[in-house]
Image: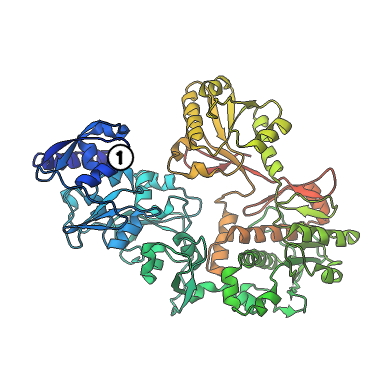
Amino acid sequence: MKYYLTLFSLVFFISSSAFSQEKVVKYKVSSGETINQIAQKFKVTPYDIYKLNPDARTGLSANTVLLIPTAAGEVKKEVAETKTAVSSGKDIIHEVQPKETFYSIEHKYGISDEALKAANPFLEKTGVQIGQKLVIPAKGSAPKSTAKPAKEKGAEKYVYHDVQPKETKFGIAKQYNITVDELEKRNPDIVANLPVGYRLTIKGTAPKADSAAAETIKPAESKKPAETSKKAVTYMDYQVKPKETLYSLSRTFHLSQDELTALNPSLSEGVKEGMVLKVPTGYLAPVAIVAAQVPAETSTTKPVESTGGGIRIIDKVKSTENENVEIVELTKKRGVNERKKVVLLLPFNLAKVQSDTSGTANRIKNDKFLNMTLDFYSGAMMAIDSAKTLKLPIDVAIYDSQETKTTSNVSGLINKLQDADAVIGPFYQSNAEATANSLRLYNVPVISPLSKDTANPIDNLYQTIPANDVIRNSVFDYMRAKNGNIVAVVDKKKESVINYIKQNQKGVAFASLTETGGLDVANLKSLLIPNRLNYVVMETGNTAMVKATIKALLDSQKTCQVQLVILEPNSTLDTDEISFENLVKLKLMYPSVTRESDEQSVLVYEKQYRLKNKANPTTYATRGFDVTFDTMMRLVQGKTFQETADLMTTQQVDNKFQYYRKEDGGHANKGVYILYYDSDLTLKVAN
């Protein structure tokens, strides 16, 4: 706070001194005119106008008289609007275009963050907005005196922070005693999300890649794997695909956005579909997986033998007892030595890959389904390695299911699956059901690893991803278990949610809506009960309704205990218009099939995955590990997989497995986490 008061005082003093030397003219606002348009006419910034006309911040109306500063007491001529930068003496006037950020503008003109904000002081409050006219100082010109207090004239010490798992923007901002707005303005690429490993600028403007000079602050308890010795880097051309962004590209090639832009200066103008980029060849390592069918370096298992129809890995491990399990709660039951067989049916579609005339590397770049498969496979191999470390009596076979939504080669593999103790896959629901039907007579459990579809009733089929209604039910079950008063705020467009609540969740009160479809705030407040926990389920994508609901609940906290709940991800809550701090105050709660955890076992998995794959695990990779490892651990409990499914709830890295028998047949998973934001800005599990 002291810093802001000092800065404000300095800016006010300098601004007042400057104003005393310039003259003003009166200007009458025309109907529909905006501050930006008026500022452009007189070649001043909106900040200059707001400084003389504070009331203008609340809006303009026709015939309002504004005081406009002029450099020499003469009204400047109106300039024609243009989409491109316009030269103005030494400086340049730039109109902000859609999707432009501090970063892209500064790189386009080769200026620093401080120089841009010094020339346009209003940016500190408003940020970059479409249509703004920005003054771009000429290169080499001295920054204006409003940029920094005099004591900062020397080389500024710069500080960076590498984002650690489970960290939030608000936690980081609090750590460095800055606001989230400041953090996002210095790092515009994190407005949408906060990727693990991303290097944040906390202070200064030195290149992020210059780690030798940068002072990087990390939480004391976090340690990165030791870096391997540097190797010569080779490069290749990469063509940008539709909908790819600078962020997604940096994640793909494991480079910071600054590093990627340094290799490809054209990125400073924005990412465009079809542009060809220079990228490190080594980061397309998955090519080796397909080319060699299964790489020896990916696993510690024995060499792979090709079996015509697909891939086969057999790893016969000597059976010994081991109760020291790091990653899972289950341990191998004492005395269980009977060997078990697990089969994975994964859709590598090797025949298509090898026959692709564009080449294997191109296939991997453009085939999202193959990339998902390879991620799942990498996680499954981690599970197989873990089973070997634990000396579990498990044999593993992996076959290429060669599947599409409507076809697969599983029928030709059935004779190899009949003696399996569990089969994981195929991926598509129809193929998983066909496999389960074929193996029903042999009582072989088939675990569907990725499908979210509602399964047909097949006794030996196990759905690992909870269905949507199961996820919703878990939230209402939790709220009722807490004896909560449940109120729903649902807009008219969410008919499916309204019908679900009315049909399945009796006793939930709906807040009334106005004739225009807005929230009746008075009615919502009347439904809240003092001396009882009130859960308000909000389902709307309308920003105005979201804001009205949040404000009403914050007001009601003076007399009632209130918690905000959503049933599914809501992108409106991720926009700048919604204050995350308010969501934290209301302890925003929602259901999820995965969790975020800093448990030692989870950190061990993530560390080992990074060491082996030189990348952070994706959601599909972790699911591959969780499903495969959970299946293997269930088979060494001295019971069949079916028996463990009826008796045991397990928890792996991200996923919980709480199987139950469906009334019409088969098994489904109801392992759902109820997550909420706690007052310390961390995400916690409520159930």
Q: Is residue 295 visible?
A: no
SS for callout 1: loop
Which quarter shows the N terminus? top left
Front position in the image: 219 or 564: 564
Decide: is 23 above or below 444.
above
Viewer-side residue, 446 vs 604: 446
In percent of the image, x 74 and y 61: which residue is there? 632
Left or right: 679, with 108 as reference point: right
Q: Which quarter of the figure has residue 606? A: bottom right
Q: Tell me if residue 229 comes above or below residue 328 in the rendering.
A: below
**Left or right position of 80 against 581:** left
Where does residue 118 sit, x and y in percent of width and height?
22, 50
Report the number of discs.
1
Question: Can residue 240 be seen?
Answer: yes
User: Which residue is pictured at 17% across the width and 51% down the height?
Assistant: 144
Horizontal side, residue 605 vs residue 461: left or right: left
- Mark 1 crowd level (few <14, some 14–19, many ≥20, 10 Å Cα): some
Residue that label 1 marks:
34
Q: Residue 674 appears at what percent x and percent y?
A: 62, 41
Three-letter residue code for mark 1: Thr
Image x and y of residue 58, in percent: 32, 32
For residue 568, above or below residue 156: above
Quarter holding the C terminus? Answer: top right
Q: Residue, x 64% and y 48% (percent of image)?
A: 593
